[in-house]
Amino acid sequence: MLSRHVVQDSASLWLHYYVKTENGPVLVKVPQAEFICFCASANLAALLSIPALGVVRTKALPLHNFDLDNVTAIYCQSRQGFRHLIKGAIDLGIDLFEADIRPEQRYLIERFIALDAEFMGHYVEDIPSSALPVFIAQRARKRSFDIELKSISLDFECSFNGELYSVGLYGRNEKGDEYQKVIMVGNQTDQGSNKQPDGEFARIVDDIQWVSDEKTLIIALINWFADYDPDVVIGWAVVTFDLALLYRRAKLHGIALTIGRGKSELGWKVADKYRPETLTLPGRVVLDGIDWLKAAFYRFDSFSLEFVSRALLDRGKAIHNVENRGEEITELFHQNKLALAHYNLNDSRLVWDIFEKTQLFDFAIERSRLTGLELGRVGGSVAAFNNLYLPYLHRAGYVAPSGAASQGLESPGGYVMDSIPGLYRDIVVLDFKSLYPSIIRTFLIDPKGLIEGLSSQESDTVDGFLGAKFSRRSPILPQLIKTLAEHREEAKAENNAPLSQAIKIIMNSLYGVLGSKGCVFHDARLASSITLRGHEIMKQTRKWIEELGYQVIYGDTDSTFVWLGGKSPQTGIGEIGKQLVDIVNRRWKEKLKNEMKLDCYLELEFESHFEQFFMPTLRGSSEGSKKRYVGAYTKPDGELELVFKGMEQVRSDWSPLARRVQQELYFRLFSKLDVVSFLRGVIDDLKLGKLDDELIFTKRLRRDIKDYTAKSSPHVKAAQKMCQHTSDEQYSRKGTKVEYLITLNGAEPVKFQKSSIDYDYYIDRQLQPISDPVLTILKVKFESIASNQLSLI
């Protein structure tokens, strides 16, 4: 299924599903649809007295709410009537249950349908052969299919004011056959020069469709969509920039943007809110590279196409000045359109190759297939939980609550142990595999189980926290996690990385959903029974390890850092780690079986071994820090690899110089190389102006400047100065990349630097904080190095 819709006509309500079949796209229509919700049966009469409900039917069901009241289903045949029902219920102070579940979604989840389905019914015969086939469905069921989706990477080039110059389109099929096309305003001879196309530019001449103006470009693109007919459109900020820009330009020219299937129009559910969640494009799926990399938990210092493509593909944009590409794009449009077409296609190809390299196509499909979320929807953890949980809840005799039982995340977070700072050799890291999902499964934590447990006999329950008791009988959530865990092991065995990653993310999101007041199942007793049980598990694990003669120097949520004592072990490090894991896992199984009569699904694993490890103190204190450390291990090629956690090295708000120096300081510390001479040389070069290029801070505005309550942030001040110097408001907008230096007159944008660089700031506020932890180990004071008055030690 590509997209899902509910459509109201004059007579009735329909569900529309645009699906891709082995024989092409089809519009499936389900007739006689209804908006559905539930109420306590005692409140039905009051609700039916609400005016303007339209055609409504009701049915008493063998279901209960979480207060154990009998419930009745209410079925509305119009959207307007359903809205009146919801508003009237609010005015009467009456709870409605599951009123937020959309009809097109409920139809699927009640049948356990996620992405693939088989519809039974008949085709409409009087549809023109050129139109999209229409199928009237009477029944549907879950089926699995493997159908190739036709995808295209789309990218626009435009002027500073948004006028479209060209659109690049690139794709490949499963056989590796390429497709590429550029629709460009102008003509091949309109170059502003007498240069003949040669080399790589000459190869794309036949791939360009020349059009006379922007309006003709838009019409040509609409025709292209009808002809090529892609199922999936990908791009970089493709919704928030490309499609939003296309929509605005089409609107300017009075063109109906009919690029959806069946000549349906692209639109937005909320005016002027150009976001993936507000986009409507019937019959097509839109995947934005930035959003989907983040959804798959990729992390980059910058999510610009240039940065990500360099990191993943080792190549980037086909332009000389990436930072000022707007000016160069306009120049190419007027001087060398073939070069602009090459640049345009290269951007489209970069996006395609990033999707293939990271398997984002497969990840998006597997995520939808697992959760029932629409293909292309990012986020949606609460909706995914509902899709998975509700059909089982209904079959167990309950409807979902009307809202959260408590307001917010009252439960504590993960357990973070006080650290023992210092420089260590041989630290073993032991991790509990999927700790929170394992806790849910082991201790039978479940929304339905909580309701039933509170009214059950003691022998039939498992104690939680904050007074929670969970029924041992047929819990839903632990069974869902069991199924997901089994599927993940199968995916790993089959080397299906996208499926394995999708399952891992879903499993780990379950605690977050239960801990969020945006979820109707949220209850502090549920969330606390997970996190506080995690605290208990981590403390007991530490106790068992230390009883074996080892020291635990730190622990964080699910990880335990064990010092082996500083002596060369008789057996291998890996063997010691395995022994610790085996002992702890065995003890947990015995403890839970004997004390709580529970099967244990907690699984401690030997995660890693740091040959050297540094846990710093809090600045200006002897107390150990938390969530900050540096570890080192030797790679197979013999090189020393450093791992930074929570240090300045991994934070983008420190200068490139500070990050480079910190990396080198710890490399020298662990390699027993001279730290002091290196640091003195850096400070000397800094004062001589040799390192100015490494002093530039780069940060983006997270909101418009006018929306910042505190204007003291250096990058905000620098952005304000850019606006003042240029009189250009674009530098004040959210997302603007600000490059600035700290000068004797504060933060100044690099382009408009007037004052001298404040080298003392970089020494005192950048180099000293990152140097002090290392120098403390060496018993050297930073001041003695900075002043070139190093004492003999």
Image (cartoon, rainbow, N blue to C red):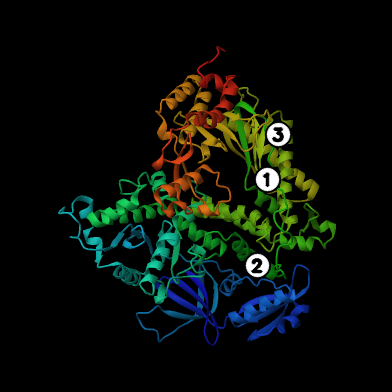
Query: Which is closer to the viewer, label 2 or label 3?
Result: 2
**Location of residue 228 in the rendering, given as x and y in whole percent from the top left corner:** 33, 68
Question: What separation in Å lies between label 2 and label 1 (alpha carbons)?
Answer: 28 Å
**Location of residue 163 in the rendering, given as x and y in whole percent from the top left corner:** 34, 63
Q: Report whether 321 appears left or right of 624.
A: left
Determine the residue positioned at 63% across, 79% down: 82
Determine the residue positioned at 40% across, 34% down: 693
Kind of residue sitting beneath label 3: Ile
**Residue at mark 1:** 414
Q: Pointer 2: residues within 10 angstroms few (<14), some, or many (20+)?
A: many
In this orientation, does residue 7 appear?
yes
In the rendered image, the vertical position of residue 627 relative to residue 344, given as above or below:
above
Question: What separation in Å lies between label 2 and label 3 (alpha carbons)?
Answer: 41 Å
Looking at the rendered structure, the secondary structure element under dot 2 is helix
**Residue at mark 2:** 390
Q: Quadrant of residue 360?
A: bottom left
**Location of residue 408 in the rendering, given as x and y in whole percent from the top left corner:** 70, 56
Kind of residue sitting beneath label 2: Leu
Determine the residue positioned at 71% across, 76% down: 89
Q: Pointer 1: residues within 10 angstroms few (<14), some, or many (20+)?
A: some
**Location of residue 172 in the rendering, given as x and y in whole percent from the top left corner:** 34, 59
Question: What separation in Å lies between label 1 and label 3 (alpha carbons)?
Answer: 20 Å
In the rendered image, the vertical position of residue 595 relative to residue 661, given as above or below:
below
Q: Report whether 585 appears left or right of 182.
A: right
Kind of residue sitting beneath label 1: Gly
Query: Which is closer to the viewer, label 1 or label 3?
Result: 1
**Camera-nearest residue between 218 and 144:** 218
Q: Pointer 3: residues within 10 angstroms few (<14), some, or many (20+)?
A: some
Looking at the rendered structure, the secondary structure element under dot 3 is helix
Q: Which of marks 2 and 3 is nearer the N terminus?
A: 2
**Residue at mark 3:** 545
Looking at the rendered structure, the secondary structure element under dot 1 is loop
